[in-house]
Image: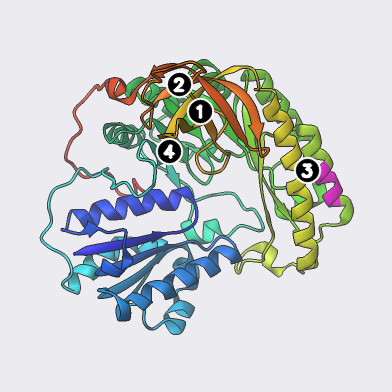
Amino acid sequence: MKIGFVTLGCDKNTVDTERYLAQLAGRGAVRTADLADAEVIVVNTCGFIDAAKRESIDAIVEAARYKDEGQCRAVVALGCLVQRHKSELEEALPEVDLFLGSSEVDRLLPELDQRGLLREPVELHPGERIFAGELPHVRYLKISEGCDHGCAFCAIPLMRGKHRSFAPDEVVREAQLLELQGAREVNLVAQDLAHYGRDRRDERVKLPELLERLVGETAVPWFRLMYLYPSGITPRLLDVVAREPRILPYLDIPIQHASDAVLARMRRPERQRTIRDRVARFRDAVPGLAMRTTCIVGFPGETDADFDQLLAFLEEMQFDRVGAFTYSPQEGTRAHAMTDDVPEWLKRERLERLTDLQRAITAERYERHVGTVVRALVDRAPVDGVAEARLYLQADDIDGVTRVRAAAGDSTPPTLAPGTLVDVLVEEVVDDYDFEATLVRVVDAPTAAVRARRTRQLPMAATTVGSFGR
């Protein structure tokens, strides 16, 4: 059976898709990138904000079209959007064969099996994942599922449930498997990385201890931390990040706003003063730290003065990058009962103003790196003498790229395979978000680096219930 996957939303969904692909491969399925050839099409949906919902519904409708125009015998919609709106979707889209919410994905194989679409099972390692992205040396590792925070605007607890940390042994084992598959950068993801381990009563392993195990039991050169609430970042965690060169000095910390009045209505745990103090402490503790944050504009009750506070705070804090989006009310959240009193045109105007300000801040901060030698990871081999890479302060897909040329006069420039670590001389900031650089030296090529330090064999055994988000 040929299977096509459409994955929408966050990197955590990408991890889930790779797990589903591995399970299906264990039953004879072969992935195809051409949906016209797929006998089964699975759409892994996102339901975080209205734009994501629309994109997911469009993808489901498009997939169903292949039942008439392609080889498709069944369309499956699963994930976050289905978890929240299953009954409405079933009524509106009868052409879809199966809807599975986030809590029901264990039914995917039995349902397809019942339809006669799967073969007899073959044995796969329980943590195995079938790569579903563009850069096989850049992988994502989900270390927990769900969220205990009560942010007024967020529906994630409704879609993903309460926070559950995965067993440390299984997280480390999966990192080792990703390394064997060629991973050179592993991005740790969760709804809140900093919350890891707090729900596990059986052992004293929090995020710092998990990071130390990942460094000690793999040879992956880059680990990156994505999405940590500032309130959960401890001195112990900062010490590990500052001390371990393979853990990148990069923190993705969502603040969402800077007006105390808005933060209170959002039910966020921080206030402007605590955010300011924590950012200063983070920078003091970790030399060269790059920080990214996220902001929402147009939350109910946001006044011009509130928004001006946010702009002033961003100018003061000088974050390296800011992701921003306009508020949209989500059913079931506390904010849904609030009056959505900021007009859409004003939300868009505020978003544009914030984006313009942050573009200037990012360009100015990036200028500090011009003339310095910085470590980078090659993502794409040279084309016309130019390789595409990323500095440590540039996360995959969201923080721009670095274009690397051979040094002037270098008649035999080295081959830069994807996954190669290099030192580059930063020459220029381009379009505010990207860098131009010159190759200084090759530090570590992937062929020489896949020498994992193993302390045990990787068993072909069942994982614990709930290990990977079930």
- Tag on residue 404? 1
Quadrant location of the N terminus? Answer: bottom left
Which residue is identified by label 3? 357
Amino acid type indicated by mark 1:
Val
Overall secondary structure of the magenta section: helix
Mark 3, other Cα within 10 Å: few <14 / some 14–19 / many ≥20: some
Mark pair 3, 4: CA separation: 42 Å
- Front of the two marks 3 and 2: 2
Mark pair 4, 1: CA separation: 45 Å
N-term-proximal mark, 3 vs 2? 3
Residue 344 seen: yes
Instruction: Tell me what residue is drawn at x 67 percent, y 34 percent.
Output: 320
User: What colouring method underlies this structural image?
Assistant: rainbow
Secondary structure state at the residue bearing disc 4: loop
N-term-proximal mark, 3 vs 1? 3
Mark 4, other Cα within 10 Å: few <14 / some 14–19 / many ≥20: some
Q: From which residue to which does the magenta span run?
A: 306-311
Quadrant location of the C terminus? Answer: bottom left
Instruction: Tell me what residue is drawn at x 52 percent, y 63 percent.
Output: 47
Which residue is identified by label 2? 422
N-term-proximal mark, 3 vs 4? 4
Mark pair 3, 2: CA separation: 32 Å
Mark pair 2, 4: CA separation: 39 Å
